[in-house]
Image (cartoon, coloured by chain):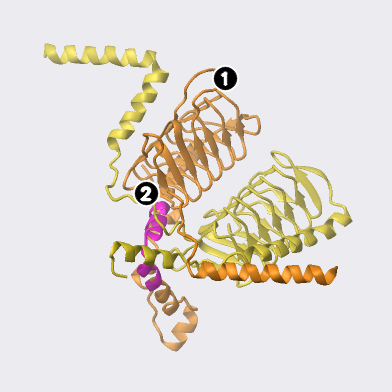
Chain colours: A yellow, B orange
Amino acid sequence: MAASIAARISRKAAASAFSSNRHVISSRGFATEAAKTISPSSDLVKWDYRGQRKIIPLGQWVPKVAVDAYVAPNVVLAGQVTVIDRASVWNGSVLRGDLNKITVGFLSNVQERCVIHAAWSSPTGLPAETSIDRYVTIGAYCLLRSCTIEPECIIGQHSILMEGSLVETHSILEAGSVVPPGRIIPTGELWGGNPARFIRAVTHEETLEISKLAVAINDLSGEHSSEFLPYSTVYLEVEKFKKSLGITI
Amino acid sequence: MGTLGKAIYTVGFWIRETGQGLDRLGCRLQVSRHRTLMNIFDKAPVVDRDAFVAPSASIIGDVQLGRGSSIWYGCVLRGDVNSISIGSGTNIQDNSLVHVAKSNLNGKVLPTIIGNSVTVGHSAVLHGCTVEDEAFVGMGATLLDGVYVEKHAMVAAGALVRQNTRIPCGEVWGGSPAKFLRKLTEEEMAFISQSALNYSNLAQVHAAENAKSFDEIEFEKLLRKKFARRDEEYDSMLGVVRETPPELILPDNIMPDKVAKTA
């Protein structure tokens, strides 16, 4: 009985000592707690010669890429993704259609390192699929989530479009703009900033340039796509390697 | 001049075709050298067996990953100069970067600690910060050294949280530089925990898919071709009953409205 009280008091003292130097000790305590509960598997793959698959089907949903679309070998397409004719998806992008559909329209391009995701439901109540219409240029490092982009738009680099946003035709988003959920960018306007605000109207000359830009990037993607063979020759290397180790193919 | 250019172009094209031909013979090693889990110096990542690590992610150095956590496509978790520890049920979404600082202007050495059931959105950048349990870091957010995000706090999308900012419990901070926007309602806080759980379930589906062997992938391709979903009315008109094979059925728990609610 006395021993248990003593134990309780000592525990309390220890707890107060801990709380006084909270930052350093709690952080260490946190880490060791996490370490205690981690049970790593012995056969965890550290290096897989296959790398990351480009097209990841989930259940019945298979990403569909049109024959003349260019999808870089770095890209991850998962779930319900459709890349329509002459579109291009550049290096390092991730198009994750696991909760809802993603469509990249005709002659559109999704540039490097973009992440396009579709939420399960949108705050506007409309279907939460991400649909990118024709002639749209999405600059590098953008994040699109359940948004709709109408034909002939330019989305500047590193912009963030949140759930339910709608970018209407012939509008341009400046680089680094953050479009809040449910926001509509009206036709023919240039918006920018965090959160996105109206800057000016798009001039007629710029409107003509939008589709020309998409076509120019499509030409560029043609040169990139000719660098890559439709199927990799990794299997030849693997067979050679297996043979050298004496494993039957 | 024009014909000379054309001639050079044609020769160049032939050379490239030859190069690709050699490629087909396997003369150049094309095996992917990307290492998902990489040791650096003497530090090795410790990853729980129930965690999902996408093959295109890079987990380097002193990183601990708890149960049921997920690291999505293209992430980089670089624990080379300090340690990163990630709790259970946390998800670090696509293309994020988690790095640690060895030294900064204040001279404090800061490991990155991310708690349990945290959602870190797409393309976030977390550098030497601490995120407590059940917090939400919006997509595209940048959290600099020494940032402390408390429980149930939310960092809005695209926010830039400057050094040593402390984001109190239950608040939403956003903008660049990040400022207090509003307080979170009760149901929004519950939503955060729910979304972390949804992501855990989704991660299991992706983990299963990414771990498939070549034979399994080819088999499922055949299954899909055979059991391609056709219009149900058309089928019933013909009197055909189609059943999707079990390999192609996704688990119910990834759809948010069918998931059992957390207590």
Majority secondary structure of magenta residues:
helix
**SS type, badge 2:** loop
Q: Quadrant of residue A1?
A: top left
Q: Mark 2 points at which residue?
A: A46
Residue that lies at the very extreme toward the right in this rendered image: A204
Q: In this view, does B45 lie to the left or right of A92?
A: left
Residue B118 visible in the current orientation: yes
Q: What stretch is highlighted in magenta?
A: B202-219
Residue type at numbered disc 2: Lys
**SS type, badge 1:** loop
Residue type at numbered disc 1: Leu
Q: Is residue B101 left or right of residue B53?
A: right
Tell me whether the residue at label 1 lies in contact with that at label 2, contact meaning CB atoms closer than 8 angstroms.
no
Which of these two is toward me, B105 or B260?
Answer: B105
Disc tally is 2
Which of these two is toward me, A128 or A34?
Answer: A34
Q: Which residue is drawn at 42% across and 79% down?
A: B226
Q: In which quarter of the image is residue B163?
A: top right
The alpha-carbon separation of the residues under discs 1 and 2 comes to 35 Å
Please, is residue B91 above or below residue A242 in the view?
above
User: What percent of the width, then of the height, locates residue B151?
Assistant: 45, 31
Which quarter of the figure is the C terminus of chain A placed in? bottom left
